[in-house]
Image: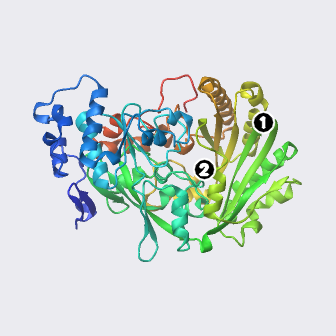
Amino acid sequence: MYVASLYGAFLVGVAVAQQPAPAFEPIDFNVTKALRDLEIHIEDIPALENFLEVERRALDDESRACQAACAAIQSLYGSGTVYDQGEANYDNFTGSYWSGEQQNVSPRCIFKPSKATEVSAVVLLSRLTQCPFAAKSGGHAAMAGASSIQGGITISFANLNGISLNGDKSIASVGAGNIWGEVFESLATSDRTVVGGRLFNIGVGGLTTGGGISYFSPRYGWACDNVESFDVVTASGILVRASAQEFPDLYWALRGGGNNFGLVVNFHLKTIPLPQGQIWGGQKTYLEADFRGLDEAFAHAATSAAQDVDAGLYVVYVYAGGRKLGLPVLYHADVGAGARSPVWAGFHNNNMTAVGDTTRPRLLTEWAAETMHDSPNGKRQLFYTLSTKADVEMATFARRRFFDTVVAAVGDVPGIGPNIVFQAIGTPQLEQMRKNGGNPLGLDPEGGPVYIMLLAASWERREDDARVTAYLSDLLREIKAEAVARGSFVDYVYMNYASEYQDVVSSYGAANKAKMKSIAERYDPAQVFQKLQPGYFKLDRAPTPGTDYYNI
């Protein structure tokens, strides 16, 4: 069993069956002692003079607590590891987030650890001072506070960026600070890849722990289902390796449970062959006259996924420049067979004419970079999602309501870029979620293929936030009502597409939610990752609860 103590990594030869089932963290856990085990003596750090546990004096506000925590980190690891407000490095870092909402968050400091023990230290210092924290892998979430925190400590994993293969190239060890494009580039030199994101600049951490739809998901399942093991810093600062054999409950929970159980610092990912780093794929472009045919072609691809488990697709309907466009994105893991897949039959049989077609063999890394440019950093962003059965009439209803309402509702918002996206999740893909003990997402292949629907918008001004949010919220509420009436609604919220108003974990089902809460209680009885890391999707709440916006 792999465990890293506070003194460093070591192997403990104990069978899983001998691992006691009760709490991972002892009831008498002492933060000061845990820090001392890391050779951090708080009595020697002037900034922590108020935090000796034997005579602790509470500070009068969180700001002073975070000032002390940031000063202690800087004292321990040097000024180059900590960015303070007012510094150019601080401004460059906050300005690097994808969404304008995240760029507007101002942490008290930013810490860039270079090894797992430093991540352990900052978790423990947060517990000691009660200064809240957030952790950033790629920083591609839409909502404020997802991977940065106002007034607290933002932990950047940027320096935890190692990428390596084991001896037989079956496992890639990938640090949490990587983005997918860099991972693909590194592995392509060995004709290997992993089940990862589809945009170059998406972070490894958030995508994987939230599920992770990939170009290779039709055959292999989602990213979370292709993790051999996680190296995760727990609430007590201990680093463990969670796998199907070791800490299997934690391993199960991390495969879709988000940031609720620890800080994953390294992902050990199962690799797949990718000769010459190439896949087949691209985008077709259709005009409004062909939208019904496109709905039907998409439905055929979703329901016939078993005919070719290397083929996948999603379709984007967008209002841009006064035009309505249908943009299906087709992809196939086999370069030679991609264009001929039987899954694409609907695109040939519906008398449709594409006015644009970029499908061809591609380098995975180049396509990931090309797609990234469609969504630049800095704009206001909102995601909203729901799931339905693969129902062509349901998709047609949602698409029509989007185009019928979008111009009047938000068409004059400066810089507006609204779209509705349908992602096909075929039955073979859902069946992959059962491997390695399953995952907590609650999707059942017996229910048949699923559409994951994404309503998304980008715009320029903060003063338009409420207007755009109200529109997408109202539209999604209307679509859900239709789905329920048709018997097509699937109670599953994909974390990586969810809005800050949606309670993702509740959609996983009552049994899975209860199991996740039990696992969190075992590894984090003090609720560090619920209270001191308050951002993103928590076990009992949406990131922004208690509003009138759509929240299911």
Q: Is residue 94 visible?
A: yes
Frontmost residue, 463 versus 517: 463
How far is the residue under mark 2 from the one under mark 1? 26 Å
Residue 236 in the image, given as x and y percentages of width and height: 25, 46
Q: Which residue is mark 2?
A: 447
Position above or below: 278 against 96: below
The mark nearer the N terminus, 2 or 1, is 1
Q: Quadrant of residue 72?
A: top left
Q: Nearer the viewer, mark 2 or mark 1?
A: 1
Task: Tell me the quarter of the image containing the N terminus.
Answer: bottom left
Q: Is residue 139 left or right of residue 368?
A: left
Q: Is residue 196 visible?
A: no
Residue at x 69% of width, y 40% of height: 420
Residue 181 in the image, given as x and y percentages of width and height: 55, 58
Residue 518 in the image, given as x and y percentages of width and height: 33, 43
Q: Is residue 464 left or right of residue 64?
A: right
Q: Local crowd at mark 2 within 10 Å, few (<14), some, or many (≥20)?
A: few
How many numbered circles does the render carry?
2
Position above or below: 455 against 469: below
Residue type highlighted by circle 2:
Gly
